[in-house]
Image (cartoon, rainbow, N blue to C red):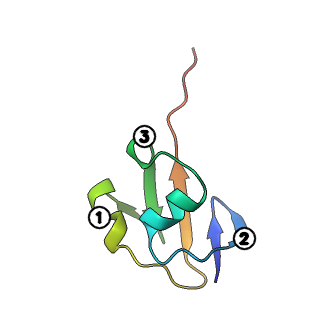
Amino acid sequence: MTIVLNGEVITTAAANLAALLAEIELDEAVVATALNGEFVASHERAAATLSAGDRIEVLAPMQGG
């Protein structure tokens, strides 16, 4: 299916948000996620099913000064 990840249209086979993070090889313990503008806590990602056209934002902490 086609979704929008951080503003970029991608194709994925992931059925839920947790599977998407694994597919794109992100450590889900250190990112924040939103599905269609709604925050999704890490313990809710496996239950957050994806549908074509969904908009997902993944934010990772950045170090710097």
Q: Which quarter of the picture shows residue 40?
A: bottom left
Kindly identify the residue that appears in the image at 45 percent across and 45 percent down: 31
Other residues around mark 2 within 10 Å, as few (<14) / some (14–19) / many (≥20) = few
What residue is disc 2 on?
A: 9
Q: Which quarter of the picture shows residue 53?
A: bottom right
Q: In the rendered structure, which amino acid carries the disc numbered 1?
A: Glu
When the figure is inspected, residue 16 is found, relative to residue 32, above or below; the finding is below
Contact? badges 2 and 3 (CB < 8 Å)? no
Kindly identify the residue that appears in the image at 55 percent across and 30 percent down: 62
Q: CA distance from mark 2 to mark 3?
A: 23 Å
Other residues around mark 3 within 10 Å, as few (<14) / some (14–19) / many (≥20) = few
Kindly identify the residue that appears in the image at 72 percent across and 70 percent down: 9
7 relative to 62 in the view: left or right: right
5 relative to 27 in the view: left or right: right
Q: Which is more N-terminal, label 3 or label 2?
A: 2
What residue is disc 1 on?
A: 44
Kindly identify the residue that appears in the image at 63 percent across and 58 percent down: 6
